Structures are given as C-alpha cells and as structure tokens.
Image (spheres, rainbow, N blue to C red):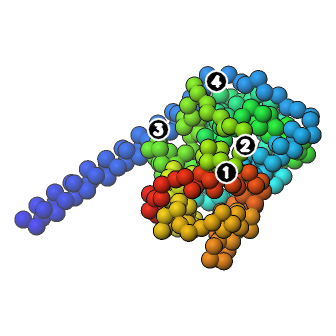
Amino acid sequence: MIKRVLKWVAIAAAVVLVGVGGFVAYNAWAFGQSMAKVYDVPVPNITRSTDAGVIARGKHVVESIGSCAGADCHGTDLAGGKPIVMGPLGTITAPNITPGGHGGEYSDGELARLILHGIKRDGRSLRFMPSQELNWLPDEDVKAVISYVRTMPPIAKPDGKIEIGLLAKVLDRRGMVTIDVARSIDHSRRATAPTPAPTAVYGAFLSKSCMGCHGEHLAGGPIPGAPSSIPVPKNITLHETGIKGWAFGDFERLLKQGIKKDGKQLDPFMPIDVFSKMNDVERQALWAFLESLPPQPFGAR
C-alpha cells in the first residue's frame, strides 16, 4: 500500500515538473519571438535644436524626471551605468548613449522613436529601458532631450553586461515585470502630459517613473522575482502602512535630501541623485497626486 502511494506521488510530482517545465519553456519561447518582432512604427519628425534654452530643458529632463543620468541608468556622463544585479531575473547595465556610443548610431528621429515607443533602429524592441514610463513626454521635451544628448562629449566605452534570466522572461510575459518594452506600449495612441503645473493631473504623469518599483498602486511590496538583496519598496500612499501624516515639507525633504520623516536616511537604492534635481513644480505636482490617491495597504502594488 505504501509503495503504491509513493508511486502515485512520484507520478504526480513528475507531471507537475513537466507542466512547470513546459510553462517556462513556452514563455521563454514567446519572449524570444516577441523580441524578434519588427515593428512598423514610423520615425517621428523630431530633430535636434541648438537653442540654449532647449538644451537646458533637455538637461533637466535627462537628470530629473527622465532619470537617464542616474548611476543606475546611463550614468552622469551618459556613457553607461553600473550593473544592476537582479538575482534570477538577470543583470542589467544601461548602455553608452553618448555620440561615441549608441547615440552616434541613431538619427534624431530614431532616438525619438526609441524614447517614445521603445523601438531600436532595427525596428525591434528595447530591453528594460522604461520607455513605457516616459512616452508621455511632449514632443518639445523629446526634442530637448535629444538636443542635450547631442552636446555630450563622445566617450568610447563598451557596454556593460545584459543577461535576461528565464524567470524575467516568464514574469515579462505574465505582465509582472517589463523587459520587452515595445510590447508593453500601445503604439496607436499616445497620451501626453499637460503644461507643467503643481497639479495632481501633471503629477499623475510624473508618478509613472515610481511605478516600476512601488507598483501600479504605489503601495510597495516585494518586486516580483527580485532577490533579497534588493530593498523592498515602501508604501507611498497615505495609508497607515505608508506615509499617512506626512506633510509636503516631509516629502520635499525626502526628495531633496533622502531623509525620511523619522529622520532616518533613505536606502540608497532609491535614486535620490535623480529626484533631488526635480524642480518645485514637479515636486508639488507629485505630492498633489499622492494626496489624491485612495490609501492602499502595504503590498497592494
């Protein structure tokens, strides 16, 4: 009797393993097929400017709301950031986008399409770069970003490692992590932000850059598939488990100095080097949006 039970347990375990293996294999195959897809999205008619004001705006977007110049992205010189080791998800290193790197390979229009649609010059999808969080930028800001990138000195620096693990491919296909960027974007329509103002409406667009870590509802919780070495994002809604009782001054100090309301330093995983460069309008708009959200319990990402 015991042998018979053990036999059926072994058979059931084998069936489960085969099923899991098939599930993983199918999703990895689907991920590869999607990444090989060539998108028929036209190159926008956006070209660089040499106007000092446009370039200054581009510098601001790159260093703040675009998060391009953060250490975990393309780096302060835009020649490539530091590797982000994500355990079973893989390793991501943002590439060199100066004129001496990939920036010199793209036309202005191709760079605009990359920013807005997550599509490389060969028509295929980018990996991991959060175009889905930036494609609300109006054409004027996209033009400004390209104009600023063109002013950077060319740096001949090879790209760092990019390795996408099986788990990342599965989570991408399940909509839990975005690796295949172009697939996550509706290329037939594009919402653009209104003129910058200290309002919740404008703040809703700015908040998109927070959702990759804090979740769609900004309630925090473990990032799917991330290793224990990655800090668990906090709840930033006005819930008891989040930032209930905070005032704008507390939030402003957090963004400017990386200091929480209780006086403790924020974990360096949060890119304070980026958020500290936000201007007053952007900080006020983001706070107005957070105040407008229904409080969510921690982990309701």
Give the SS element for disc 4: loop
Viewed as shown, does residue 158 lie left or right of 153? left
Give the SS element for disc 3: helix
Viewed as shown, does residue 3 lie left or right of 127? left
Residue 285, label in figure: 1
Position of residue 272 measured from the top left corner of the image (x, y, whole percent): 72, 62
Pick whichever of labels 1 and 2 is earlier in the sequence. Answer: 2
Pick whichever of labels 4 and 2 is earlier in the sequence. Answer: 4
Q: Residue furthest left?
A: 1
Position of residue 53 measured from the top left corner of the image (x, y, whole percent): 89, 40
Q: Amino acid at mark 4?
A: Val
Please name the residue that numbered disc 4 is placed on. 41
Residue 29, label in figure: 3
Residue 54, label in figure: none
CB-based contact (under 8 Å), mark 1 and mark 4:
no
- Residue drawn where x is 62% and y is 53% of the image: 288
- Quarter of the picture containing the N terminus is bottom left
CB-based contact (under 8 Å), mark 1 and mark 2:
yes
Q: Nearer the viewer, residue 184 or 123?
A: 184
Between marks 4 and 2 in the image, the one whose residue lies nearer the viewer: 2
Q: CA distance from mark 1 to mark 4?
A: 32 Å
Q: Amino acid at mark 1?
A: Ala
Pick whichever of labels 1 and 4 is earlier in the sequence. Answer: 4
Pick whichever of labels 3 and 4 is earlier in the sequence. Answer: 3
